[in-house]
Structure formats: C-alpha cells, structure tokens
Amino acid sequence: MRKKEWKIDVRQLVTMVFGSFLLAFTYYHINFQNGLSEGGFVGLALIGKYLFDLPPALTTVLMDVPIIIVALFLKGRKFIINTVIASTSFSLFYELCEQFSPLTMNLHNNLPLAALLSGLFTGIGAGLVLRVGGATGGDDILSTLISEWSRIKIGTVFIMMDALVLMVSLFFLPFKETMFTILAVLISGKMITWTVQYGHRDIAPVPAPRHVTYGMKKKTA
C-alpha cells in the first residue's frame, strides 16, 4: 500500500501538468492582460494588500499552509504530492509566460469574450488537475473538502467561494472588470464540474474515498 501511495501514474502526471499549463496560460494571457480580477485565496490576498498593505505572496502562503496540513491527514500524502506537482507546474508555466511569451490577447474592447474564454479554459484546466487527484492551491483543496463533506458539486463550491471574494473586491477593484470576472467564474465552475465528472455517470457531486488517492475522481477551479 505504501509503495502504491508514492507511485505516480505517467498519464495522470501528464494530465496534471497540462491542466496546470492551461491554467497558467489563461490567467496570464486572458485574465492578466485584460484586467480581469481574481477570486479564491489570490483575491483575498489582494484585498489584504489594499486594506492592510500585506504582501500578497506572504498572505497566500499563510492561507495555503494550514489547508495543506489538514489535507495531508484527510486526503493522504499522494494527494499532497500531486498538489505540489500541480502548483509548482502552474507557477513555473506562469513565470515562463510572463517572461517569454510574445503573445498578446487584447480583449479590452470585448470583455464578454474574455470572460467566456477565461471561464472555459480555467475550468477545463482546474478540472483536469482535480480529476486526477491534485490541486493548484489551498483554495482548490478547501473547495474539494467542502464538496466532499457537503455533497455539493465541486464547481458550485468554487463559484460560491470565488463570487464571495469578488463581491468584496468590488469595493477596491474596477466594477466592470470585476463583474466580468464573476461571469468567468460562473462559466469556470460549470466547466470544472463537467470536466471532473465527464465519463463518470453514477458519481455524486464529487465522490472521493478518504485516505485514497484522488485517482479518477477529482475536481478544483
């Protein structure tokens, strides 16, 4: 059992890395380049920056660490290993896009399209990572745990958490961009649920045996 827990399936690894790449590519080329806001822990970190001048990087880590510790006991080491791989891949791909990508996707005059593309691609990317048993951050882990405990669909939990943060962000961030970000979050949540559950018919909101690898059924973002 212990040996199996540490074993990484190549197909799952490729799926996780591709999902992380899709997330990073979309966040940089669509969200960042077109001024769309952020939900989840990143959004909370930005609120902390506006209100208390706290470094977003530090705030995010402080929120991630306790969630990861809880997940270690509830989900097992395999889940944490997958999460480390996914989150590290995401950070690396985002940095590469930021530093070297020549691509510019200027959709400032068509924010509905930006929201649609953001929702579709971030939903698929996060769904792929979650489907094979990983997460790209503490907010993804928290959404997964809430989904399992409450039996609410994973995508719905993502929508509720992100929308709540974005509603608070309206006091500090541009109204127009924030509202279109909420639209992107709604689309993303639906895509996450679809991606995680595709091909699994008799699956409740997001089943997932405790202490067992999140193998075929995992969802985030």
Image: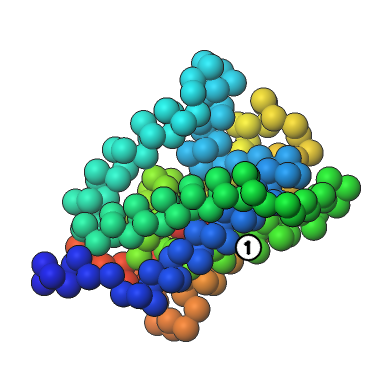
Give the residue at mark 1.
121
- Report x, y in % for residue 56: 50, 29
- Report x, y in % for residue 181: 68, 46
- Report x, y in % for residue 15: 45, 71
Question: Where, by quadrant of the figure, is residue 99 drawn?
Answer: top right
- Report x, y in % for residue 104: 77, 51
Residue at image location 56% in from the left, 66% down from the top: 124
Q: Is residue 213 above or below residue 118?
A: below
Element carrying mark 1: helix
Residue furthest toward the front?
A: 100
Q: Quadrant of the N terminus?
A: bottom left
Using the image as rendered, state which of residue 99 and residue 88 is in the foreground.
Answer: 99
- Disc 1 marks a residue whose amino acid type is Phe
Q: How many marks?
A: 1
Residue furthest toward the top?
A: 52
Residue at image location 73% in from the left, 44% down from the top: 33
Q: Is residue 48 above or below residue 166?
A: above
Using the image as rendered, state which of residue 31 and residue 40 is in the foreground.
Answer: 31
Q: Is residue 189 left or right of residue 147?
A: right
Question: Where, by quadrant of the figure, is residue 190 drawn?
Answer: bottom right
